[in-house]
Amino acid sequence: MPPEEEHRVQVHLDRLLAERGMTLSELATRVGVTVVNLSVLKNDRAKAIRFSTLTAICRELDCRPGDLLGIRED
């Protein structure tokens, strides 16, 4: 296997939460995941996300995956 590269995926969770006036704790409750797991995602430390979690986040934030995720231009 090739060595693991650092990913360039950015998560725009802070912006989306602010735009919707929602806290991370509220989103965690609505989605059914821990605040810690959402915090890892929010702080760009996540290495993966389940499609079911992505779907639930998008449902609760009324957004599409492309609104939540982007690619960092390095």
Image (cartoon, rainbow, N blue to C red):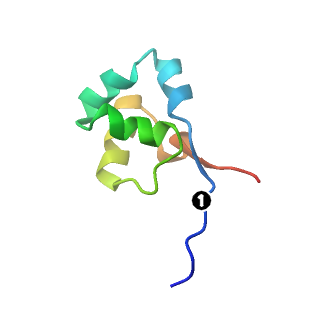
Structural crowding at the residue carrying mark 1, measured as other residues with C-alpha within 10 Å and reported as few (<14), some (14–19) or many (≥20) = few
Q: Quadrant of the C terminus?
A: bottom right
* Residue 60: x %, y % from top left: 34, 31
Residue occupying the far bottom of the picture: 1
* Residue 22: x %, y % from top left: 41, 18
* Amino acid under disc 1: His
* Residue 50: x %, y % from top left: 34, 55
Report the residue at 29% width, 51% height from top: 52
Report the residue at 50% width, 47% height from top: 45
Relative vertical location of residue 36 with respect to residue 74 in this rendering, above or below: above
Residue occupying the far front of the picture: 3
**Dot 1 lies on which element?**
loop
Between 22 and 66, the one lying in front of the other is 22
Report the residue at 50% width, 33% height from top: 13
Count of picture labels: 1
Residue occupying the far top of the picture: 21
* Residue 3: x %, y % from top left: 57, 77
Between 29 and 6, the one lying in front of the other is 6
- Residue denoted by label 1: 7
Relative vertical location of residue 17 with respect to residue 2 in this rendering, above or below: above
Report the residue at 46% width, 50% height from top: 46
Between 41 and 12, the one lying in front of the other is 41
Res. 26 image quadrant: top left
Relative vertical location of residue 37 with respect to residue 28 in this rendering, above or below: below
Relative vertical location of residue 5 with respect to residue 20 in this rendering, above or below: below
Res. 12 image quadrant: top right
Answer with left or right where residue 73 lies relative to residue 30. Answer: right
